[in-house]
Amino acid sequence: MNDEDFAFEEIVKLDKDSLSPIEIDEAEGVFRALDNDNNGFIEPQDIKAAMDLLKIKLSEENWEELKNGINSQEDTRIDLEYFLDLFQKYKRLSIKAEDDVPLMVFISMGGNPDKSGSISADKLRSIIKEEFQMTIDIEKLLKEIDTDGSGSIEYEELKGLLESA
């Protein structure tokens, strides 16, 4: 495995559980829309609709795991914090099911699941240089992939980098 393969594999692991601010806002909006009585909870039967609205695609096995996990709790109501935890976990499983490595990397670094948004060239530079202490010429790579010179890496630019590595 060369340095580039290691780096991008580890980038996915580095922030795999993070949600972008846009994802958090979207999830909070879905939660509030389903919290009909404004008591700060949604019911277990609302979770599938919530995940569908958030475009989370899960296998039947994952849906069963989700339902069983909720039903095994003393209080089956779901508050916002627990809902965000569920969204985080099942978003990651949904992405793995799609087997789209460039998308996984993009999302783990702050991009959006619909491939919109961008990741910071500075963040990518920092991860390569500081977190992984790699010796690759990251400046050259960034010049090659940041084709519009914005300092932000869009999905297609990152995908091109990953596919060429």
Image (cartoon, grey):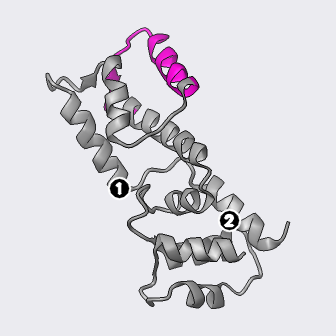
The question of residue 62 being in magenta is answered with yes
In this view, the residue farthest toward the right is: 1
State whether residue 87 is above or below residue 98. above
Check the picture and name the quadrant holding the C terminus.
Answer: bottom right
**How far separated are the C-alphas under marks 2 and 1?**
22 Å
Q: Residue at x 56, y 40 (%)?
A: 93
Q: Is residue 99 magenta?
A: no
Nearest to viewer (mark 2 / mark 1): 2
The residue that appears at 83% across and 71% down in the rendered structure is 2
In the drawing, does residue 82 fall left or right of residue 104?
left
Q: Amino acid at mark 2?
A: Phe
The circle on residue 109 is none
For this orientation, the residue located farthest to the left is 37
Tag 1: amino acid: Pro
Quarter of the figure with residue 133: bottom right
Q: Secondary structure at mark 1?
A: helix
The main secondary structure of the magenta stretch is helix
44 to 112, vertically: above or below: above
Which class describes the residues within 10 Å of circle 2: few (<14), some (14-19), or many (20+)? Answer: many
Task: Check the image and report above or below for 54 versus 45.
Answer: below
Which residue is denoted by mark 2 in the rendering? 8
Q: Position of residue 7 (x, y in %)?
A: 71, 67
Question: Where in the figure is residue 73, as x and y percent of width and height?
Answer: 46, 12
50 left or right of 97?
Answer: left
Residue at image coords 44%, 55%: 113
Q: Quadrant of the N terminus?
A: bottom right
In screen coordinates, is 79 left or right of 5?
Answer: left
Q: Position of residue 136 (x, y in %)?
A: 75, 82
**What's the residue at 52%, 37% (across, down)?**
89
Span shown in magenta: 61-81
Give the residue pinned by disc 1.
21
> From the viewer's perspective, is residue 30 above or below residue 62?
below
